[in-house]
Amino acid sequence: MQHYTHSLLTLRFSTLFFHAPMAFSHDLEVESSSPPLVFDVRRSEPELVAPAKPTPRENKLLSDIDTQAGLRIQIPIIQFYRNNQSMAGKDPVKAIRHALAETLVFYYPLAGRIKDGPDGSLVVDCNEEGVMFIEADADITLQQFGHTIKPPFPNFEELLYQPPGSEAVTNTPIFIIQVTRLKCGGFILALRFNHTIVDGVGVFQFATTMAGIARGVLQEPPFEPLWHRDLLRARDPPRVTFNHREYEQLTDSGDAVQQNFEQRSFFFGPAETAAIRALLPRDLDQHATTFEVLTSYVWRCRTRALQFNPKEDVRMMCIVDARGKFTSALLTNYYGSCFGFPASVAAAGELSSEPLEYAVRLIQKARSEVSEEYVHSVADLMATSGRPLFTVVRSCLVLDTTDIGFRDLDLGWGKAVYGGMAVAGAGTFPAVNFHVPSQNAKGEEGIMVLVSLPSQVMKIFAKELDDNLVKTNTTI
Ligand SMILES: *[C@@H]1O[C@H](CO)[C@@H](O)[C@H](O)[C@H]1NC(C)=O
Ligand SMILES: *[C@@H]1O[C@H](CO)[C@@H](O)[C@H](O)[C@H]1NC(C)=O
């Protein structure tokens, strides 16, 4: 039984999303000025998908990393798939719904509901209520999205519907999943997860099993999903052993209040990355990862564009997956949040005027801090300091998803054309950038950096990015 609600698109797409071509000489922006895409999405009533078999009924406590204020948000992921002749007659909605129910048997806490526990803790009630699933059809082809599929996606709120009442409350489904068939036989899988119970790597592990089951090559996870949240609970007695500048609670001096954020994706192909690397001394160039180089470059351009008081501190906080930093192998297949994001801190003036090397060294130093001890120290800080939010004033968070593998997730229709983060920003905090693996129109591999900035600043930022690349040939 399907009840379709017909939702005619009445949204006007802001011209902000479709810029007139700017003078980008380095292919930073692959496409521009296409007319706004307008299409209809017919959606069925959201349904709950429960585990395919009975699962344990129990309450499970989340960790002190999970329970930090900054994770009480939902993060959207989106996957675009082409039509595939070998799948003729197969329905992606059916295949995914089935695989989802099977996967939830192994990840049954995700089919439960999160509740408040004692002392600000969180508990998941494993009650098999299920995750929310939405079936949809869009009258558009994949080709119409253009050569390079990248955020911001037109009509995104129709591709990942947010049923009223499903946001910002406990007691709601942990995942919302929408599968939208496209006119060409391709489809879009969009998923929104509550970050208090899984992180990006955890969602990827879940999705890997779901994809394997959908393809018919798996019947269970290739590895046992591990709960073990006790491993990341505060120690007794708690010992905060690092100076966690990523959780400093600053009062805003006025210049950091920004509104009207706009999203844009910038592609850094081999040429752009080489031009930026040429700004660095050779030894540093050889010892810096592409993520570090691009993050430093974006941080500096962003700081210049935002024109903060030069004496004020700015922060770049790089999320570092910590699973591999633990001596215990139990963390390998852990699907809760297991990361740190130490802040690189610099005076805005200094960061803007110093050579790029300055930023790269700060970023490298901060990232290298993440260790097993570091994560325990964060858990202890959470338990003893009221589970603070990360620093939001003049700060930016960044996550590198290039190695997670979302683009390679094959549900039977081959690899995704675009896979991973659906929007820049996280919840009400817009200053979150993502690095997503991508290709430009020429088919060259590179990194798409999803950026969100106040709209009046975005143009200045884009010009900063470009100017610096142009200057590369002449000055260092
Ligand atoms: C995520 O779950 C937590 C814990 O239940 C809750 O406080 C928060 O509101 C949820 N976030 C969203 C955006 O649903
Ligand atoms: C079609 O799907 C098969 C099986 O997943 C995959 O191996 C193949 O690469 C896909 N073809 C295209 C054109 O994506």
Image (spheres, rainbow, N blue to C red):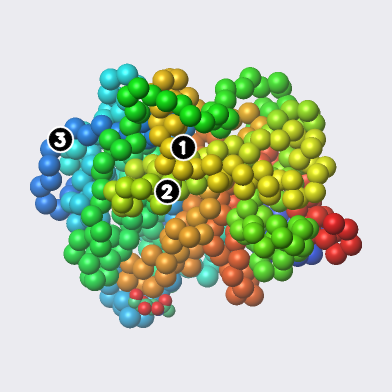
Q: Earlier in the sequence, mark 3 or mark 2?
A: 3
Q: Position of residue 280 (x, y in %)?
A: 76, 57
Mark 2 residue element:
helix
Looking at this view, is 119 or 440 the one in front? Answer: 119
Q: Is residue 4 visible?
A: no
Looking at the rendered structure, the kind of residue marked 1 is Tyr
Looking at the rendered structure, the kind of residue marked 2 is Lys
The span from disc 3 to disc 1 (Cα, nearest Å) is 31 Å
Looking at this view, is 118 or 125 the one in front? Answer: 118
Q: Position of residue 82 (x, y in %)?
A: 43, 71
Residue pointed to by mark 1: 374
Looking at the rendered structure, the kind of residue marked 3 is Glu
Of labels 3 and 1, the one closer to you: 1
Residue pointed to by mark 2: 325
Q: Residue visible at 44% across and 31% down? A: 377
Ligand 2's image quarter is: bottom left
Of labels 3 and 2, the one closer to you: 2
Q: Residues within 10 Å of mark 3 (few under 14, many from 20)?
A: few
Residue pointed to by mark 3: 58
Mark 2 touching mark 1, by CB under 8 A? yes
Q: Is residue 313 visible?
A: yes
Q: How many numbered discs?
A: 3
Q: Position of residue 95 (x, y in %)?
A: 26, 64
Q: Residue visible at 68% across and 49% down? A: 360
Looking at this view, is 180 or 432 the one in front? Answer: 432
Q: Earlier in the sequence, mark 2 or mark 1?
A: 2
Q: Is residue 204 left or right of residue 287?
A: left
Mark 3 touching mark 2, by CB under 8 A? no
Q: Residues within 10 Å of mark 1 (few under 14, many from 20)?
A: many
Q: Position of residue 457 (x, y in %)?
A: 74, 41
Q: Residue visible at 32% across and 71% down? A: 412
Mark 2 C-beta closer than 8 Å to ligand 1:
no
